[in-house]
Every structure is written in C-alpha cells, then in structure tokens.
Amino acid sequence: MKAFYLSILVFAIIAGANMTVTAQDAKPFTVGVGSEADFSGKRVTKVKFLEVTEDSRCPEGVDCLWAGNARLKIELHFCDTEPLTLEMDTNGPNSSVKFEGGTVSLVTLDPYPKANVEFDRSAYNATLKIEEADQ
C-alpha cells in the first residue's frame, strides 16, 4: 500500500513540474520555472518561464549596500510570429519589457533569498503581468 501512495506522490510531483496555468490580459499570473502559462490575449498565446540566470538579491536578515538583482528568461509565444525570448530583472529598467504589441512586467520572483538558507533552484515562481495594446 505504501508503494501505491508513493507512486501517486511521485506522479503528482512530476505532473506539477510541467503544470500549465491560464492567464488573461492585464491580470498578474504566476508560473513556475520550467512551466508555461496559456495566455488568452490578442497576440500572445503562451508564456514559458525558462530559467533564472542570476540571483544576487540581498538575502532577508542581511544588511547590504545594494538590493541586488535576479535575472530570468521567459519566452512569449504569439499567434502570428515566432517566439520571443526576453530577459527580465527584478531590479532596474528590465523589470518591464516592451514587445511589439505590448508590455510584460515582472511583479515578483519567489522565493526571496534568506540568509544561510539553501533552496532548490527549480522552486522559483515568477508573477508576471502582460498588457497588450489595443490594435
């Protein structure tokens, strides 16, 4: 019986790693690293959270001279053109990036680093907001 429950747990973890969420224009949505969100926009059809390439944010519980930055890559899929890969930052001008027909904004990137606490880099979740221009 334990093996049965263990196999269900493993399946749920694997299925959750590739979970798809549905997002709407101008409403924040959260997507996990390695996952995608179906987007019901005018041009954007899907958003993939590819990876976090850097995370130098000042950990909670530490006094830093600079807040630091985390950089991530996402991929926007469109109904009429090839996908577009964008790099976004938690701190600075690339927290909102314009693309032809709209803007994508990084609202938050979790988990936020904590002093002396290691975490699994596959546990990142990005909260994004896409606003498409009226055409």
Image (spheres, rainbow, N blue to C red):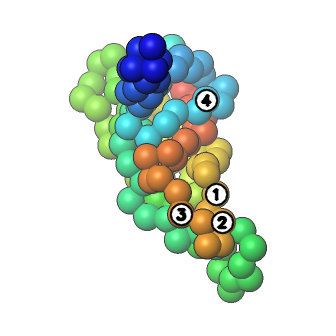
Toward the left, the furthest residue is 82
Query: Are the residues at dot 2 and dot 3 in contact (C-beta closer than 8 Å)?
Result: no
Disc 3 from disc 1: Cα separation: 11 Å
- The residue that label 1 is drawn on is 112
Query: Are the residues at dot 4 and dot 3 in contact (C-beta closer than 8 Å)?
Result: no
First in sequence, mark 1 or 4: give its number.
4
Report if residue 36 is visible in the image: no
Q: Is residue 48 above or below residue 40?
A: below
- The residue that label 3 is drawn on is 118
From the image, state whether disc 3 or disc 1 is nearer to you: 3
* Tally of numbered discs: 4
- The residue that label 4 is drawn on is 29
Disc 2 from disc 4: Cα separation: 24 Å
From the image, state whether disc 1 or disc 2 is nearer to you: 2
First in sequence, mark 2 or 4: give its number.
4
Sort mark 4 into few (<14), some (14-19) or many (20+) by Cα contacts within 10 Å: some
Rendered-image quadrant of the N terminus: top left
From the image, state whether disc 2 or disc 3 is nearer to you: 3
Q: Nearer the viewer, residue 112 or 130?
A: 112
Residue 48 lies left or right of residue 39; in this view the side is left
Query: Are the residues at dot 1 and dot 2 in contact (C-beta closer than 8 Å)?
Result: yes
First in sequence, mark 3 or 1: give its number.
1
Element class at badge 4: strand
Element class at badge 1: loop
Sort mark 2 into few (<14), some (14-19) or many (20+) by Cα contacts within 10 Å: some
State the image coordinates of residue 111 (x, y, percent, origin top left). 61, 51
Element class at badge 3: loop
- The residue that label 2 is drawn on is 114
Q: Could you tell me which residue is drawn at 61 percent across and 73 percent down?
A: 116
